[in-house]
Amino acid sequence: MLWAGQILSVSAARMVNFGFGVWLFMRTHSALDLSLLTGVAFVATMVCSPFAGAAIDRLPRRLTIAVGDAGTVVVLATLLALFAWNGVQVWELFLANTIIGVLVAFEVPAYSATISLMVSKQDLSRANAMRTIADSVQNVVAPTLGAIALRCLGINTVVLIAVLAGLVAVGTVFLVKIPQPDRTAACADGWWQGAGAGFRYIAARPALIGLQLTFFVVSMLSVMGWQVLTPMVLLRTGNDELAAGLVQTVGAVGGVVGGVVMLLRPPAVRPVRSVLLAVLAYYSLGRIVLGMGDGMVEWAASWFCSWACMPFLRGNLDAIWQVKVDPAMQGRVFGARQVIDNLALPLALAVVGPLADTVLEPGMQPGGALLKVFGSVVPGGPGGGMALVFFGTGVLGVLVGLCGFFVRTVRDADTALPDHDMVPELVTSA
């Protein structure tokens, strides 16, 4: 029930984000404003995540989840009233998105930490796969429904749908029994000490450091591909928006298929090795092949494979952390993970945009130096530089996956660290 409520809530949130983006661009005609709208929420999430993690371990889990969902409903209801009353100013939309970013800092770690209390450790990878299915569903459904609702019914209706979906999500939180870990140690720490406890916990355990650093690089390389997919398809197809949307949709369907397969298969005996195999498949089939492709079939099939690998990657990876980290520490540890993981986004965007525009794209045009080197494997012409981003990040991603197999700290993380329920854990020694 909690999962169903989250699918509805996340899909509605994605739909309203799409609506806000279109509404803002139609009024300001500024791509910078669109970037800033996302950026303010991103920064708010990063800054607040350590403190949110401390709050999650101090407060009842049901309360932290409900506050995140209910807070989003209040923000959206306020915007709905403003839209209906006298319109929304741009600064009000930015303020609302900042507040939502703060609430996201609570929601994501709280749900991750709660899953490990509600599900047996043998089924954690499946439970996490259900979360990736929810992400995939909202990527299939939300943009299409958002565009239809925005065009036919207006922004007010889009926001109203999100408010109603949020209320349903809040209701499911109170209909489900949510266990509570011991909060004694978390309450004994001050807020500043609690905010840093997750980082100290990870730093004290080499296996967790190895996992976190490995998948920070994996995430950064992945973001580079996500950023250039739509521009590449548009350049390759002569600005065919339908083609770009179709590739994205096929990919999200792959995420649903991968999640269903993950649900049906037995739990991995060695989850780290399953994760590393998923990384190899993700970058070889979902990045290298896409960069080498020169048509809709290749792009869509490759993007399908990319998404299909995500449940195996994220489902098993999150399960490792949920099994190895004491539940009383999970809010703080997952808050720290959220900060580190989110750092991959600005770093990737800072690199891939200028690199693609000023070096790779010109170099992959007829007569370009890069085309002479890579032209036999990556087609040149418009979008060729962005295709080279896919090929290059794919090769690097495969190397990272292979390194994971050869670095013992990473490869044996699931056996080197004891499960949290196997030995006494001093959760204050973070």
Image (cartoon, rainbow, N blue to C red):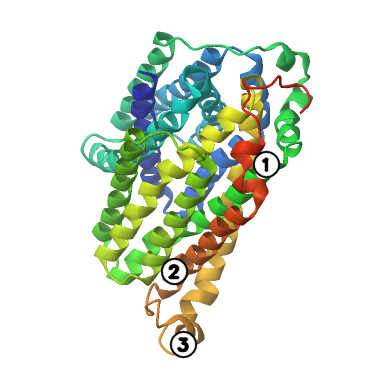
Above or below for 59 versus 266: above
Q: Residue at 67% x, 12% y: name it.
A: 183
The mark that comes first in sequence, 3 or 2, is 3
Residue at the disc numbered 3 = 372
Describe residue 394's horizontal placement relative to residue 231 as left or right: right
Which quadrant of the rendered structure holds the N terminus? top left
Q: Residue 78's image quarter?
A: top left
From the image, state whether disc 2 or disc 1 is nearer to you: 1
Q: Nearer the viewer, residue 142 or 5?
A: 5
Q: CA distance from mark 2 to mark 1?
A: 35 Å
The amino acid beneath tag 3 is: Lys
Question: Which label sits on residue 386?
Answer: 2
x and y, in percent, of residue 305 in the image: 35, 54
Residue at the disc numbered 1 = 207
Describe residue 79's horizontal placement relative to residue 341 as left or right: left
x and y, in percent, of residue 90 in the image: 48, 40
Q: Does dot 2 land on a helix, a strand or a loop?
A: helix
Q: Residue at 50% x, 59% y: name it.
A: 224
